[in-house]
Image: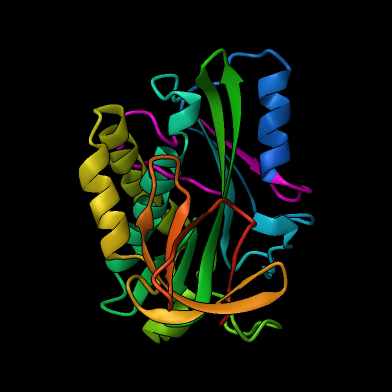
Amino acid sequence: MYKIQPNTLFTGKTLKYLSKCHSTNDIAAEMIQSGINVFDGTVIITDNQTAGRGQRGNVWEAIIGENLTFSLIFKPTFLKASEQFQLNVAVSLGVFDFLSEFIDENLSVKWSNDIYCEDKKMGGILIENTLQGYNIGYSVVGIGLNINQMEFDNLRATSLRKVSQNPLKYDLSEMLSKLLENLEKNYLRIKNGDYESLKNRYLTNMYRFQEYHYFRKDGQQFTGQIIGIDETGKLGIETEGGVVLYFDFKEVEFVI
């Protein structure tokens, strides 16, 4: 059970706790579709998510009660459908800012919205939007963040406790409150139209930004460097031959 009192205007003021569920994103979507009045900033959280998913349909690995697995409902009606990547930027930076309070270096945002420490994944974000006309009506922000888990089947995964080498477990209620505070701060920045500074900070903290690395497209490997993102969030990669290519979600893979 989570007892939280985040220092926020609205985020986390309404919280629905489930001891077990298949997917908090699915529960959030069902709440929206049911027609009930869902408050902006509502959190659905569980200790045991049996079918959590991430980008590319990946399954999120989490030991029961060790990490944060939750969904957050926002109502970003101020964002046009074409601007939806702004929410990815704000949420990614909210998680990044939260973790930065505990980790001094090697923390980064991997496009489009994973959180990495060195070459290992600490968290994942999945945002699913519902449109109202030309604007976004609701956004369901699913977040899986490894906090206390020490052992992983996936060798590319890590946690806050592993990286910080904290001998004691972090209090998950306290961590959730701090995370929600950082998420709301960055959400309010996009609400105020502060797109440019958020984008610049996103690039500054982007995983492998302006470094030559291997990427894979349609099974073919190539070398390039990330040079930025366009206004819709597509990833710009300059190949060794100087050709700049832009990729949408799921169109390119990082070779790690």
Where is residue 31? Give x, y as percent.
Answer: 68, 25
Image quadrant holding the C terminus, namely bottom right
Whether residue 13 is visible, yes or no, is no
Magenta segment range?
1-23
Q: Is residue 144 above or below residue 101?
A: above
For the image shown, how many numbered marks are present on the structure?
0
Instruction: Give the residue displayed 27% in from the left and 38% down from the top.
Output: 195
Please provide percent x and percent y for residue 96.
35, 60
Instruction: Identify the image quadrant of residue 247.
Output: bottom right
Front residue of this view, candidates 151 and 142: 142
Which of these two is toward me, 104 or 135?
135
Q: Nearer the viewer, residue 205 or 23?
A: 205
Q: Looking at the rendering, which quadrant does residue 244 occupy?
A: bottom left
Q: Residue 241 appears at what percent x and percent y?
A: 43, 76
Q: Residue at x 71, y 50 (%)?
A: 19
Is 26 placed above or below 36 here? below
Q: Taking 228 as reference, is 132 left or right?
A: right
78 drawn magenta: no
Residue 184 occupies quadrant:
top left
Q: Residue at x 44, y 23 (%)?
A: 80
Q: Answer yes or no: is residue 2 visible.
A: yes
| Residue 211 spot, x, y in % from top left | 35, 78
Q: Main secondary structure of the magenta part?
A: loop
The answer to if 20 sits in the magenta stretch is yes
